[in-house]
């Protein structure tokens, strides 16, 4: 808070406390209201706004402030009613359509939102990136990435785009699985701002997810050249080493992080994973346990610890630990399948399969409209289940049966288990039966 703002807010609060008459210029009221909103003191903001309305009834800016407060309070119906009162006296305001669009987004009415946002663009005085970035931002927050790109490209096509616009375009394309365009726009963002660590990290993670560890490492090195102590980048670099199978180098990176931040749960989990890969189960178990102690609501360390307990023959202990991971992430199929594997190991009864499958969630498809066939889903679940159990013969049998129903079964299975592409038994079995 600057000195002028501080004095103004103190004067307002003194008048309020003493129950004296409250009168300020409209600009001063705006400063007071904005201060409370920035502090997330929405009840105080609303009280100040009511005093302002007594002095300046029918002021359009105050009504817009009230709309924003109602939206912050998730009272979208009241916010929309207020916007309707402005239609006659302020129909040319682009904010009118901006907030209408926002409310439609929050109500899941994305088509109506896009129409309102289009009107906001038309009625704005030019493409002001700072103000109108509000549109793609709210769409991205609610995961409407295709719709967000429509407005990001308005900036790009106008020639007014800055680094943030290109970054957001890359982010959207990445979430739409168009990695080529994602890379293109991340690189254009770096052309505008080559010293942005966030973009170098995003580009590196993109390459890492595309299994291009060399390019990923280059991006992380650029980020480290900007800030050599950035723990997030060092952790990403360790992930690249893990992907390349260089666990010793990954461990060296992570230990460097833990020297300065011994309570970093992400680093502890990754370190545990490296030790597990090196068959150092004692140190892996310690790392997972410490990660859980540092961050009890972080699911992955429970997953790591449960696998170690399982490998040690403590199946009941593994179930208790994986149950905690499932409590945190109830829709995680890996955890659910692993728990099923534990149940089978405890009972030594393969006939439990149907009962276990009945109690776990089906695999979530990225395009559910393509996979409505319940028989296909059932076959595919069984293939995935037996893969996790380690019964590769039954896995392949059910995988082939699922593909006979829907030829996208292979793509779906290997996207869930990319490491299965390198499994010699699976490749030979499928090759033999697909001739």
Image: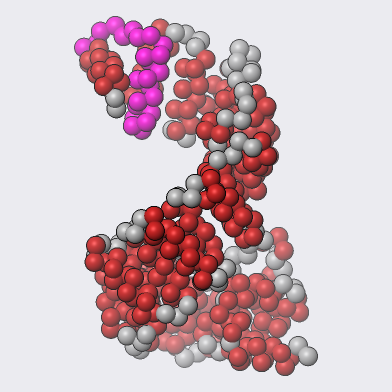
Q: Quadrant of the N terminus?
A: top left
In the image, residue 288 lies at what x, y percent? 31, 73
> In this rendering, is residue 219 above or below 340?
above
> Where, by quadrant of the figure, is residue 434 drawn?
bottom right
Query: Which residue is found at the position 39% from the left and 24% from the top?
Result: 34
In-front residue for pair 378/383:
383
Query: Which residue is found at the position 67% from the left and 91% from the top?
Result: 429
In the image, residue 355 lies at what x, y percent? 54, 78
Query: Which residue is found at the position 56% from the left and 53% from the top?
Result: 186
Confirm whether the magenta stretch covers residue 339: no
Extreme residue toward the right, this view: 435
Q: Quadrant of the C terminus?
A: bottom right
In-front residue for pair 227/170:
227
> In this rendering, is residue 71 above or below 224?
above
> In this rendering, is residue 139 above or below 346?
above
Q: Which residues are magenta?
A: 18-43
> Where, by quadrant of the figure, is residue 255 drawn?
bottom left
In the image, residue 431 lies at what x, y percent? 71, 90
Query: Which residue is found at the position 48% from the left and 56% from the top?
Result: 200
Observer able to see residue 110: no
In the image, residue 154 lies at what x, y percent? 66, 38
In-front residue for pair 106/341:
106
Confirm whether the magenta stretch covers residue 19: yes
């Amino acid at each position: 808070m600057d000195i002028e703002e501080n004095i103004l807010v103190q004067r307002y609060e003194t008048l309020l406390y003493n129950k004296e008459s409250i009168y300020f210029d409209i600009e001063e009221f705006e400063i007071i209201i904005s201060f409370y909103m920035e502090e997330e003191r929405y009840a105080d903001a609303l009280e100040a706004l009511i005093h302002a309305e007594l002095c300046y009834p029918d002021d359009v800016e105050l009504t817009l402030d009230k709309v924003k407060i109602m939206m912050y309070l998730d009272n979208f119906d009241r916010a929309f009613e207020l916007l309707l009162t402005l239609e006659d006296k302020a129909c040319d305001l682009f904010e009118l359509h901006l907030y209408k669009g926002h409310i439609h987004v929050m109500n899941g009415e994305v088509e109506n939102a896009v129409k309102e946002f289009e009107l906001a663009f038309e009625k704005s005085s030019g493409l002001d990136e700072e103000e109108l970035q509000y549109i793609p931002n709210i769409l991205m927050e609610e995961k409407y990435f295709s719709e967000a790109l429509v407005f990001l490209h308005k900036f790009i096509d106008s020639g007014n785009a800055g680094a943030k616009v290109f970054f957001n375009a890359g982010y959207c394309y990445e979430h739409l699985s168009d990695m080529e365009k994602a890379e293109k726009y991340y690189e254009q963002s770096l052309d505008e701002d080559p010293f942005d660590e966030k973009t170098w990290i995003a580009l590196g993670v993109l390459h890492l997810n595309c299994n291009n560890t060399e390019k990923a490492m280059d991006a992380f090195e650029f980020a480290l050249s900007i800030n050599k102590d950035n723990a997030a980048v060092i952790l990403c670099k360790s992930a690249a080493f893990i992907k390349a199978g260089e666990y010793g180098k990954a461990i060296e990176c992570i230990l460097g992080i833990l020297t300065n931040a011994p309570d970093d749960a992400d680093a502890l989990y990754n370190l545990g994973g490296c030790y597990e890969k090196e068959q150092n189960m004692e140190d892996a178990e310690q790392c997972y346990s410490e990660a859980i102690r540092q961050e009890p609501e972080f699911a992955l360390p429970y997953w790591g610890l449960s696998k170690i307990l399982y490998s040690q023959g403590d199946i009941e202990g593994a179930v208790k630990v994986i149950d905690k991971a499932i409590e945190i992430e109830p829709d995680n199929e890996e955890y659910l399948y692993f728990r099923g594997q534990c149940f089978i190991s405890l009972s030594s009864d393969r006939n439990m399969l149907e009962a276990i499958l009945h109690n776990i969630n089906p695999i979530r498809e990225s395009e559910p409209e393509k996979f409505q066939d319940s028989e296909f889903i059932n076959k595919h679940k069984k293939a995935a289940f037996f893969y996790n159990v380690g019964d590769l013969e039954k896995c392949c049998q059910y995988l082939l049966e699922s593909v006979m129903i829907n030829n996208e079964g292979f793509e779906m299975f290997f996207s869930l288990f990319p490491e299965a592409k390198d499994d010699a038994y699976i490749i030979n079995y499928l090759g033999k039966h697909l001739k």
